[in-house]
Amino acid sequence: MTSWVMERMMRRAYPGTVNSPARDSPVGALLREWRQHRRMSQLDLALAADSSARHLSCVETGRAKPSRAMVLKLCETLDVPLRERNTVLLAGGFAPEYRETGLDDTDADGARTALETVLAAHEPYPAVAVDRHWNVVTTNRAMGLFSEAAPTAPTGRPANVYRLALTPDPPDATVRMVNFLEVRTYLLERLLRQVRATGDPVLRALYDEVSAYPFPVDDAPSPAPIPVGPFAVPLRIDTPAGELRLFSTMVTFGAPADVTLAELAVELFYPLDDHTATTLRALYDSAPGGS
C-alpha cells in the first residue's frame, strides 16, 4: 500500500483540525488554511474542483461568497474530515451536512451491530476499536488477553492505545513487550505522520506526551529483528506460554456520512506464526466465555 493511500486513510480514520479555527472564522480563511495544509496551489485546487483560480482567490479573500455546493466540493477535493466540513459550512452560514450520532443512539444500531460483528468475527485474535484520538471505544474478548501487559488507564481519562503501548512494562511483569524500542520508534513515527496529515492539536499533545515517556529499565540488548515479509514492525510479547508474534492492520467504515463513523477505526491483530495462532486459540478457549 502506498504512503499516499495510507495518508488518506489516516486522514479519514483519524481526522483533526487545522489550527483549530473558531466557528465564526470566515469561510474563505478556513478553506485557505486547508488548502495550504494540503500543500495545493490555488490553481491546482481550482482545476481539481472544476472552478477557476480567480474565483477561488475571491472566495479565500472574502470578496465572493461561495455556494453550499461549492463549499462541499472544495472540502471534498481537499479531503477535509467530516467534522471539519461542518465547521466550514457553519462559517459560510450554512447548516451542517453531516450528523454526529453516538454509538449508543438508536440511529446507530446498524453501525454498532456491524462493529460488534467485526470484533467478534476476529476472535480468537485481538481487535480494538478506537476514535480519532486513539482512545479505546471497545474491544473484543480476545483483546483482554493483553490486559496483563497493559498498565491501567489514569483515572478520569479514557484508555488510549498510545499511552498503553508506550508505557514501559514493570520489571516484574510476567507478560511484557520484547521489542519495545522497535515498536516505540514505529508508533511514534506513525503518530507524527498523522499529526502532520491532520494538524490535530489533540494528537500533537498526545505525541508530545508519549514521546517523553521513559525508556524501560532493562539492561538486556534489543532482540534481533525477525523476518516479517511486507509488514513493518511486529509486536513481540513474552508470555508464560512463550513469545507471541503479531502484526496489525487498520480498517474503517467505507463512505461514512456520519462524523462518529468517519472517526472510528478498528485495529486487528493477526498471528505471524503457527505458535502464536495456536497459543491465542488455546488462551481464548480456556478463558471464561471462550468457545
Image: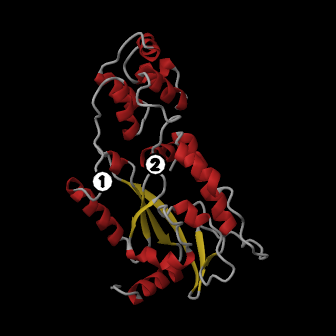
Write the residue at 49% across / 19% down.
42
Dot 1 alpha-carbon crowd within 10 angstroms: few under 14, some 14 to 19, many 20 or more? some
In the picture as drawn, the residue positioned furthest to the left comes out as: 106
The reply to whether residue 172 is visible in this rendering is yes
The residue carrying mark 2 is 14
| Mark sitting on residue 102 | 1
Please tell me whether mark 1 or mark 2 is closer to you in this view. Answer: 1
103 and 13: which is toward the camera: 103
Q: Position of residue 217 (x, y in %)?
A: 75, 73
Image vertical order of residue 37 relative to residue 235, above or below: above
Q: Position of residue 98 (x, y in %)?
A: 29, 39
Write the residue at 56% across / 60% down.
162
Separation of residues labelled 1 and 2 (CA atoms): 17 Å
Dot 2 alpha-carbon crowd within 10 angstroms: few under 14, some 14 to 19, many 20 or more? many
Write the residue at 43% across / 49% down.
13
Image vertical order of residue 60 relative to residue 22, above or below: above
| Circle 1: element type | loop
